[in-house]
Amino acid sequence: MPDGSESESRKLLGRLRDTMAEEAAGQARLDKITHLTADSMGTEVCSVYLFRDEDTLELCATEGLKQEAVHHTRMKLGEGLVGRVARTGKMVNTADAPSERGFRYMPETGEEIFSSFLGLPIQRLGEKLGVLVVQTKAKREFTADEIYALEVVAMVLAEMAELGVFVGEGAALKARHTQAAMIRGITGQEGTAEGHVWLHEPRVVVTNLVSDDPERERERLKSAVEKLRVSVDEMLAGASGEQLEVLEAYRMFANSKGWRKRMEEDIDRGLSAEAAVEKEQSAARARMGQVTDAYLRERLHDLDDLSNRLLRILTGQGSETGAEMPADPILIARNIGPGELLDYGRRLRGIVLEEGSVGSHAAIVARALAIPLVVRADRVLTEALNGDHIMVDGDQGVVHLRPDESVVSAFRDKIAMQAQAQERYASIRQKPAMSICGKQINLFMNAGLLADLPSLPSSGAEGVGLFRTELQFLIRNQMPRRTELVEVYKRVMDSAGDKPVIFRTLDIGSDKVLPYMKPNDEPNPALGWRAIRVGLDKPGVMRMQIQALLRASEGRPLSVMFPFVAQYEEFRAARAEVDKAMAIERKLGHKVPETITIGTMLETPSLAYASKKFFEDVAFISIGGNDLKQFFFAADRENERVRRRYDTLNVSFLTFLEGIVQRCSETGTALSFCGEDAGRPIEAVCLAAIGLHKLSMRPASIGPVKSLIMRTDLDALYDVICDARERGEQSVRESVLDYLRWNG
Ligand code: PEP
Ligand code: MG
């Protein structure tokens, strides 16, 4: 950039800074900015259009157009050139505006005499705020330097808007982050919560945008980048697996000359170091919205995270600012690792993630902690500020930010009703789940953390029907040691007391990738090298785990089951590992369990058709309905497009499950069901009606499920199911619901 224009943009920035420092009402400042910009750039017109609501822009200040049009001229998103800039987030630069496609002439502004047009979006970190325009009578395209200068003005406007500068008397903008917002996401964990926002990574507010001492700013940037590099290297030293990959990308960016150079150029043009970082961050966010390639998006996210770190170093803002976590925190993050989530633990009332997925590790932990979770809550990070009042509806996958009175009261009614129901459930806690027709259903709970165990007595569960052991592996940065596992398993058995616990051996692969294991690039991970397949092919970890379980039992009875067994032989081979481990333990003189019960999950349709010998041989079978259903219908349980497509109460699936019940009853094999459907009352009574008399579910579901079982005649319900099937209905749900409603 030639020296002359460099100092021009610095001069303009200097004048803008003075305006920012002055005490003036919002409108007066905007007027001054448009005047200064037109004057410095030598254009006849400079106008600011800001969003009134989501899709309406309003002319809020102008130099050069008719003043009567200010606050009167409005346009829809996409309408005219201004609307086009707002919709696409991209610049329009033309020498002949009237002949541009989509041009719309606004007679009240008097703009017909202007020919050239340069419009840029006013946006902050991906949030669209408005459009900044300059126009001239002479036909000419604007140069790169002029575009740069206008970009900087747009950025200053965006920052001022963020700081609430335009709010107040004669305000051009409504106060930001004050209006109610409803954000739709996807249910990660059911439940409702009210509280106050706690941002996992607080927003950094840049107050010092402009500087006339580029030398000093370059130095500040240099030393901040240096600090950043050191901190990334430190993190790298202790990292492994997937985390290592991310940090390597961080290091690449931290050392990137291009990134640094662009920021230095911004500084030379008059921005402060932090404003330069944010300008590049905004550009990366804008790109993020446009790229569809998953890998590239991830890398842009990495750059975004890194920019946040750099901003925190430069401004001294961040978690160390002393902001206090509210007493009722609802955590908001783009994404969060399972370890970090566990650090927050049960202090959190709710969790909202801008990204995340239903099957992510964070979701697994949130579920284990029974904290309502909404994932894919689009733009929640842009909208939410620390301390905002927030209501999370995990049942509907909806978040209400700064809710108004009507939402608050409706939501509180819902919470109160749930609390009343909880009281009702507490009153039946010690009662057996006995149906009206006299069938007793055994209800167990699923668990995965030591922290789950305290809910065993209060849930009314008869024991733990599924203890998922992978969480201890997922939340660490390295493979847990055997002694650590012995400790965990021992404490699980101690807390359960006399109640039985079924430990499931490690179920990794597919969606559950250990951070310290080399990821496998598989075309179809759900059908790939996972669970017992890994355990049998590379038995080291499974052996260590079995040994830990045997030692933890200290002679007490032990129940173990294997995940994802697809054929009899896999079960036999896995059981042989247990026998071998028992023999070794005996030889070493360690106490072995007084009885050991070895069963398997049934998660692949193939196992339902295994030989009779298998059913006679296995001690028990637990149907993993989550996986079984996805393989039965060939519909990925993680894929939002298809995961709800097929009903659990579809007659094909129920008939298939009934077949398994039949086979187990022929051989007297103990059978249970431990997928998520066991915890849904309607599904649960149907499962019970077709003969699944042992159900294992999340602790919070036991009350509602028990309550419905106690009010249902399962024999009559079975007839309803059979009739619906006879009639050729696809799903028995409607008939079942009618029957249940009819019976109150
Ligand atoms: C299942 O598949 O139903 C199950 C209980 O296992 P997970 O959800 O851990 O895969
Ligand atoms: Mg499973």
Image (spheres, rainbow, N blue to C red):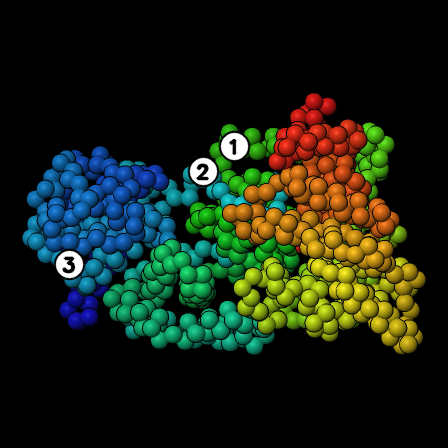
Which secondary structure, mark 2?
A: loop
Q: Do the residues under discs 2 and 1 have CB atoms within 8 angstroms?
A: yes
User: Which residue is denoted by mark 3 in the rendering?
Assistant: 142
What's the residue at 75%, 30% (across, down)? 719
Q: Identify the image quadrant of the C terminus.
A: top right
User: Which residue is denoted by mark 1 in the rendering?
Assistant: 407
Q: CA distance from mark 2 to mark 1?
A: 10 Å
Rendered image quadrant of residue 192: top right
Asked if ligand 1 lies within 8 A of label 1, the reply is no
**102 vs 400, nearest the viewer:** 102
Q: Sequence-wise, which precedes: disc 2 or disc 3? A: 3
User: Which residue is denoted by mark 2 in the rendering?
Assistant: 180
Percent coordinates x, y for residue 55 in the rendering = 32, 40
The amino acid type found where label 1 is placed reads: Val
In the image, taking residue 492 as reference, residue 220 lies left or right, namely left
Q: CA distance from mark 2 to mark 3?
A: 40 Å
Q: Sequence-wise, which precedes: disc 2 or disc 1? A: 2
Q: Identify the image quadrant of the N terminus.
A: bottom left
Q: CA distance from mark 3 to mark 1?
A: 49 Å
Q: Nearer the viewer, mark 3 or mark 1?
A: 3
Q: Is residue 62 visible?
A: no
The amino acid type found where label 3 is placed reads: Phe
Q: Is residue 464 visible?
A: yes
Q: Is residue 702 above or below residue 138?
A: above
**9 vs 613, nearest the viewer:** 613
